[in-house]
Image (cartoon, helix red, strand yellow):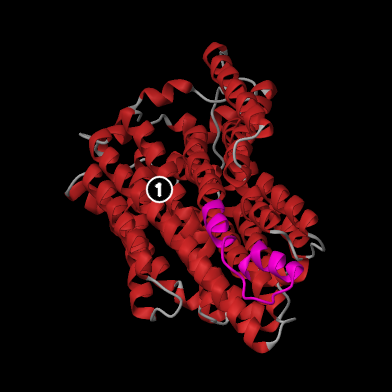
Amino acid sequence: MTAPLSTPTRHEELSRPGRWIALSVLVLAVLLVAVDATVLGLATPFLSEDLKPTGTQLLWIGDVYSFVIAGLLVSMGSLGDRIGRKKLLLTGATAFGLVSVLNAYATSPELMIVARALLGVAGATLMPSTLALIRNIFHDARERSVAIGIWGAAASAGAAVGPVVGGFLLEHFWWGSVFLINLPVMAVLVVVGVKLLPESKNPAPGPWDLASVGLSLIGIIAVVYAIKEGAVHGASWGAGAAAVVGVATLAWFVRRQLTLESPLLDMHLFRNRGFSAAVLADLLTILGLAGLVFFLSQYLQLVQGRRPLEAGLAELPAAIGAVVAGLLAGRAARRFSVRAVVSGGLAAIGLALGAITLVGQNTGYPLLGAILLVVGVGAGLAFTVTADVILSSVPKEQAGSASAVSETAYELGAALGIALLGSIVTGVYRGFPVPEGTPGPVADAARESLGGAVEAASALPAQTAAELVAAAQRSFVDGLHTASSIGAVVLVATAVAAWFLLRGQRLEDGAGAHH
């Protein structure tokens, strides 16, 4: 067959309007993922009330998607390089929409966890495909920087639209409706993408090594599981065994990649200092941010008493800041330097996370809004430039694998952040003293989660109920302060590391190297 050899030429012949039209389709895929990620946090209090998950089950619902997607991203990115990124993107988008229905109609915590895991399988196909297609469609470095900025802005816009639309739906329909908003986006993406997206693939990819797929999946999930178990339950034989299995399996995976003629992941990519530094910065940044992102909606609704739509609107400054900063990031990195923009963005996020310690149960919105705006600006600058560095550091034939590494770092950081920082919030929260006279079963239910405390209080006399909820809210805020402080330290340390590791890095260097 000669088709695979001819596909790259299609992109090079795309007109300037054609490139931007193709980008508009890719933006829909980004919106699909971003909206889904944000509505889960908003729906958590309602989901908790209906499905009654334990605190541990609630954490699994929050992070199993990230666990699965992190384990499969490298495999899916490599698969897209082989079978075609357009084909993988449209197949994944269809599956994503269909599995969203299963999420919407889940009837138990266990089924919800399974549905989120399946969504992770579908989600693993989307983000690497979009970035890889951008790398292959936009050959001019400055044009590609703008495209990546728009791609990042779309993710931020989705993060803004998701809570607002989700809040509206939660006020008028049941919690499952927030997952159904994926369907129209998926339908438009597939119908329009079939006609407008150009196909691209590696013209000589070699076979897709199934053994490597299994090793990467088992290794990453085992390591993440070990960290999660250790964070929640402390040192145990189970967590230790999982850690040993995970590390050994990943070592086997790396060794296998170094010996294969056509590896699933070219380990030589990591010899590029800019590539490795950008990937590490992404992982640590989202790790530090994950606790705030996951618990913010609960704080706004269950501590400050905002309605879902109000909570969604309250989060808008972060998205607005990220959209504006993302669109300007490429220009700023060329005017100043890559390391100045990335380090500056990360330091800003770190300072904003530190300011969370000033937020209490009754804090006015101006302070919270300012904090979220700074977080958004910092994230927009840092993530957009690191994505540009990662894409421009590799040959376009390996764009899928490189994008997958970037997204794996992001998802792994999110999973670890929710597991570690989320467990810290939960651990601090569970230590609060219950009012005298509170029955044992009610106290146990209240200590499972803040949502559980609000529900358990409804069975108590008014005075006792008010005292129980107030104590639970104070303890939750204490946990949020602890997690944010740790996140702030992680972000500032990452900013310092990025300043040294990205020394001399320029966006134009990698872009021109492989043309």
Residue 163: image location, x then y, percent: 55, 71
> Looking at the image, which is closer to me, 301 or 95?
301
**In the rendered view, would you say 188 is above or below 200?**
below
Image position of 307 with respect to 273: above or below:
below
Examine the rendering and report whether any part of residue 507 can be seen.
Answer: no
What residue is drawn where x is 55% and y is 11%? 259
Residue 91 seen in the figure: yes
> At 57% across and 41% down in the image, what residue appears?
199
Res 31 quadrant in image = bottom right
User: As drawn, is 348 to the left or to the right of 3?
Assistant: left
| Residue 185 image point, x, y percent | 62, 64
Query: Which residues, given as a range, are shown in magenta?
Result: 423-450
Name the amino acid type tagged 1.
Thr
**Residue 416 placement (x, y as % from top left):** 53, 44
Q: Is residue 21 magenta?
A: no
Q: Which quadrant holds residue 391? A: top left
Indicate the secondary structure of the residue bearing disc 1: helix
Q: What residue do we see at 55% from left, 78% from top? A: 470
Relative vertical location of residue 323 with respect to residue 250 in this rendering, above or below:
below
Seen from this angle, which residue lies furthest top?
Answer: 259
Considering depth in this image, is 425 or 296 the residue closer to the camera? 425
Name the residue beneath numbered marker 1: 285
